[in-house]
Image (cartoon, rainbow, N blue to C red):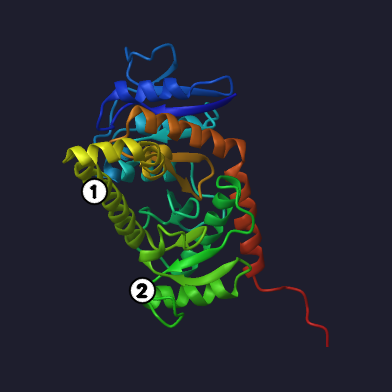
């Protein structure tokens, strides 16, 4: 039985939506454990009591320090203490990052954790990271992100020897800012399946299995993709319903339209892993529906099942050892 601690408080739609999503994800192999105040209606699920709540508009670090008994912090602590195998929260993202760093801590050798978001590309899903954990990054951080993304692609997306690309302003290796230029050189020298740079316009086409960038750029790209997809789908629906001919045509293409919407809907993936920690954490969107929460819990359970944390630790340990200078005397 995989136990997933679910922060029931702090999300935009209220605890009822979170509880309904957690209940939908419960199965013979997955046990959601709700974290919230005494008296929360759990619909029969287990409750781990937490008196306080971190609001969306609170400063993350201050909130985590001043509210150690908030649902978000208690949910992360449950993983650290072995009461749960993974944590899911749709609350304050910055506070979730701060709580995870405090309670779960980083894998040895990891300088910065990264948010890994699944992109619904035409050639099959790919992963974009970092998608917002680190506004600033060093070139060596992007190499670590690439290793994390490779493990994600192998274990979650079922891709063998995933292709990795670096997000830049051109495919040519000499294009980009200082960060991308130096990161490109390091990635090219690594043992990863690095295929060079890619541009933002190719992400939804399926530029690579893993797209690497800094958290500032990644978050801008992610929000742009989400907004573009949402507005295109809404515009498409408006055009179909604007005339009788459109409505008749809409009936004919309904099956295909539903499949397209299902593939592009962020709720299908539920959330994003915060990779690089000693415990498994999934960050869900603040406006998550019960369907999104259910899929976030399932995503967390799958990460536990595939030992994503353990695989990441092995990969990072191997790269750290490989980067150390040899202490063996050189033969003369």
Q: CA distance from mark 1 to mark 2?
A: 25 Å
Q: Secondary structure at mark 1?
A: helix
State the image quarter where residue 270 is shown. Answer: top left
Give 194 or 6, whichever is nearer the viewer.
Answer: 194
Dividing the image into 4 quarters, which one contains the C terminus? Answer: bottom right
**Image-based side of 49 in relation to 280, left or right:** left
Task: Evaluate whether residue 247 shows in this view.
Answer: yes
Tell me, yes or no, whether the two marked residues, 1 and 2, touch with CB atoms within 8 Å.
no
Between 230 and 24, the residue placed more toward the observer is 230
Q: Residue at x 44, y 15 (%)?
A: 45
Q: Determine the image quadrant of residue 237.
A: top left
Q: Residue at x 24, y 35 (%)?
A: 55
Residue toward you, 292 or 10: 292
Task: Name the side, left or right, on which 236 lies relative to 271.
Answer: left
Location of mark 1 (residue):
231
Q: Secondary structure at mark 2?
A: loop
């Amino acid at each position: 039985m995989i136990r997933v601690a679910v922060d029931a408080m702090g999300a935009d739609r209220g605890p009822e939506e979170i509880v309904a999503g957690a209940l939908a994800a419960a199965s013979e192999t997955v046990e959601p454990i709700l974290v919230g105040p005494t008296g929360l209606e759990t619909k029969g699920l287990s409750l781990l009591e937490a008196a306080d709540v971190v609001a969306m508009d609170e400063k993350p670090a201050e909130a985590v320090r001043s509210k150690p008994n908030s649902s978000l912090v208690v949910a992360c602590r449950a993983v650290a203490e072995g009461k749960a195998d993974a944590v899911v929260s749709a609350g304050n993202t910055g506070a979730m990052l701060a709580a995870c760093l405090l309670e779960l801590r980083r894998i040895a050798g990891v300088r910065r954790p990264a948010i890994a978001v699944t992109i619904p590309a035409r050639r099959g899903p790919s992963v974009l990271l970092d998608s917002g954990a680190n506004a600033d990054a060093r070139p060596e951080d992007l190499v670590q992100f690439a290793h994390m993304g490779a493990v994600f692609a192998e274990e979650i997306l079922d891709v063998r020897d995933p292709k990795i690309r670096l997000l830049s302003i051109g495919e040519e290796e000499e294009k980009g800012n200082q960060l991308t230029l130096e990161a490109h050189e390091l990635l090219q020298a690594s043992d990863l399946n690095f295929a060079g740079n890619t541009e933002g316009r190719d992400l939804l086409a399926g530029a690579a299995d893993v797209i690497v960038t800094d958290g500032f750029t990644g978050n801008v790209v992610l929000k742009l993709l989400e907004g573009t997809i949402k507005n295109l789908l809404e515009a498409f629906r408006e055009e179909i319903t604007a005339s009788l001919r459109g409505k008749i045509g809409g009936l004919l293409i309904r099956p295909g339209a539903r499949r397209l919407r299902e593939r592009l809907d962020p709720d299908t993936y539920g959330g994003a892993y915060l990779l690089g920690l000693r415990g498994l954490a999934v960050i869900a969107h603040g406006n998550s529906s019960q369907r999104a929460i259910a899929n976030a819990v399932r995503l967390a359970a799958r990460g536990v099942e595939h030992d994503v944390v353990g695989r990441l630790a092995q990969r990072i340990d191997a790269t750290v050892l490989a980067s150390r200078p040899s202490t063996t005397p050189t033969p003369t």
